[in-house]
Image (cartoon, coloured by chain):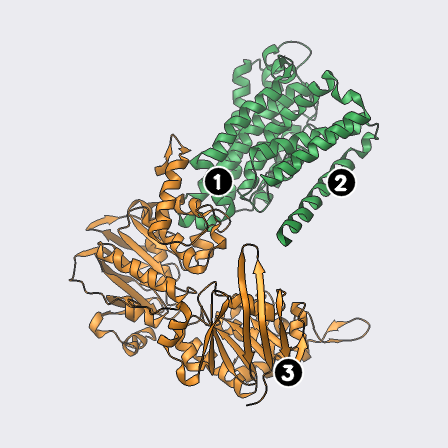
Chain colours: A green, B orange
Amino acid sequence: MRKELGTFALLVVLCIVVAVLNPRFLSPANLQNMARLIGMYGIFSIGSGIVIITGGIDLSVGSIFALLGVLLSIMLTEWHVPGALAVTAVIAVTTGLGLLHGLLVTKVRIQPFIVTLCGLLFYRGLARFIAGDETKGFGSGGFEALRNLATGSLFYIPMPFILMIIIGVVMWVVLHRSVYGRYLYAVGRNEVAARYSGINSPAIIASAYVLSGLLAGVAGVVLAFYTNSISPSSHGNFYELYGIAAAVLGGCSLRGGEGSVIGIIIGAALLQVLQNLVNLLGIPSSLNFAVMGAVILLGVIADQLLQRRSVAK
Amino acid sequence: MSSPILEMKGISKRFPGVIALDSVDLEVYPGEIVALSGENGAGKSTLMKILGGVYQPDAGQMRIDGQEVVIRSVSDAISRGIGFIHQELNVLDNLNIGENVFLGREPLWGWPLRLVDRRKIHAQTETYLKRLGLDVPSETPLRNLSLAQQQMVEIAKSLSLDARILIMDEPTSSLTLTETERLLEVTKDLRAHGVSIIYISHRLGEIQELADRVVVLRDGRNAGSLAREEINHDNIVKLMVGRDLNHFYEHPQTAPQPPCVEVQNLRTRRYPHTAVSFDIRKGEVLGFAGLVGAGRSEVAQAIFGVDAPLSGTVRLEGESIKISSPQDAIAHGIYLVPEDRRNSGLILEVPIRENITLPALSRYAAAGLIEYDKEEKVAAEMCRKLNIKAPSIEARAGNLSGGNQQKVVLAKWLSLDPKVLIFDEPTRGIDVGAKAEIYQLMRRLAESGVAIMMISSDMEEILGESDRVGVMHEGRLTGILERDQCSEEAIMRLAVGKQ
């Protein structure tokens, strides 16, 4: 809990600083837009975090977004598949890819980094090939229900944010209150001891990649309609790293066994506030990544120093 | 008598919430082996870590050769001639012997290129190896050596650092009988060369054989010391626990029961060409003796399903069962208390509660969600039943002493209903008090009808606790001895492969 509190404090401090320097930060339009992005990033960050909790990593998320966007666009605009069916199909595809990653990690025993790195390369290439390297999209009309999922609001609260809250609550129960969640952390802490306690650790580990694929699918649908145009060579670039960064900021350890849903969501929010800060404070947008990297590094250093002090006491 | 090489006076050390050492004294004379004894948590390790420069004392003085010294760091300790052989070996298995011995202070040549002088490293290392009676070339990679040989490499490293005071912390805990003998010889030889040795061991037999003096700590204070002629099992135990221990070895007395498990023609991956058959009766403790690497743990792991057997059948209460994973074994009431409790038995970073309930968590859950009050009740009950000493059930398993950790591993299985319980080295590295408790538990379980298989490399334990003893040698079960046939000689004969 301590780590989550630290990240939360950092988030609050940043919000105050930005709000003081530029009051536009608190304008309804800005807050709404930020909440929309937090929702979208939060959803797949939870998936990345779950994989990290088992001691693995999922680098394929960004490319999965591109593949999903291209497939969804083709299904809806070229094949005229009904919306619900198309969405179900693409989410099934990404979930299936998650299962494939899980099986490669647990049955073939390839390191998660390698499995999902190959996924990152492969799905990006596949998306570009399927789209003939052309930008796909959904046009300016139609698919209102789906569009609403990405750009709509309910009582001024953006839909993606609401979606994230619902998914967050469900995943919080799954991770922190269920037997399955306990197994997930146990496997991440010490897979051997978990196996000796009768836990089917390969199945648990594989399931984390399935969940990551599922959540990437949901977030991918929202992202596709949010951008409304999918250029297969850049759509979703670096998103896997945002997910990992959010999870790490939120208290997940890359060694596994640590982290919480609330922490991951706070981490995702922190990343968005940083993006917003760059825009609002007139920092050249080319420095975007540099600011993000610097703040994450400073946060981790501060955490280390505090930890060392509390140990020394 | 000559003056002491080392004097520690009034050493105190406080950790948050505990006084680890309260004004402890220790003197060591040149060429003397001092055994440092005490239960786990008595302060032995803390005292040695202060001497080794790992911790700073809060109070007290240290003198080496009569000179007052302050040891600020590990390298400080090394430069004052203090060598520390830790229980867990500190060698790198990707390097060879010589590279390990000279790690961090490699002799150089070819200025200004600063190349490592391999020839010098190996030549010097060979002389240390010869002195220690280790007959392997210095270029041998560490991973090709046995644990005992790796330990010799550590000792060679200390010798190369001109250690005059050598701390040995449980040096024999993972060695076989013959390797232990060898190490004891080397230790005596070092003493003959004037090295002073502080020897920590739970094995009272070794202390009896080696020590010139025993210093016993209890609860962070000096409990007393014994001179050479006073050293015996009873005296040491008395000082350690501050009371007499009855029931240390309870002798079993049970009528033969029908077999509970029958293992037939079991072949393990490690020894694919030898099949093992035996049975364990209801209510008996079947000891498994043999040298380390004889294949005993592999048999246990095959029965438990960790490493599924290549072939063979297991019958439980007359019915043939198929075990291909620990889940299968657990479903049939067959449980394993593994050898390596810190890695295989427990998740050190999580609370005692979560460790105890892990194997049967779904029993304390409804619709997949954990019912915390049920879980807590079971964990608290097991802690009470097994007398686990911990601040609360929320304490991390890693913060407990070895004995209490082992009890937590046991609690995992006793909260279910065991039919067959396999212990692999149940009391390794555990203090006398907790040992006695674990033996009593084992006996009580057997009396309640559980079939127990107990793998042990501790001869006293095998002789004292088993109803029958199976002996293995290189994958073969060379014999099963009835209680009245058991003797150290009979077991050793079978363990080295003589029929």
Mark 1 or mark 2: whose residue is earlier in sequence: 1
Give the residue displayed 62% in from the left and 19% down from the top: A73
Residue B87, position as x, y percentages in the image = 51, 67
Chain letter of disc 3 in the image: B
Residue in front for this viewpoint, B342 or A54: B342
Q: Label 1 sits on what residue type?
A: Leu
Viewer-proximal residue, A233 or B478?
A: B478
Q: Position of residue A302 (x, y in %)?
A: 70, 44
Which residue is the site of mark 2? A294
Is A6 situated above or below B279?
Answer: above
Chain name for mark 2 = A
Q: Is residue B356 above or below residue A34?
A: below
Q: Nearer the viewer, mark 1 or mark 3?
A: 3
Q: In terms of image quadrants, where is residue B114?
A: bottom right
CA separation in Å, label 2 and label 3: 53 Å
For this view, does A103 lie left or right of residue B3?
left
In this view, the residue in front, B415 or B433, is: B433
Residue holding disc 3: B65
Chain hosting mark 1? A
Q: Residue at x 44, y 36 (%)?
A: A180
Res A184 label: 1
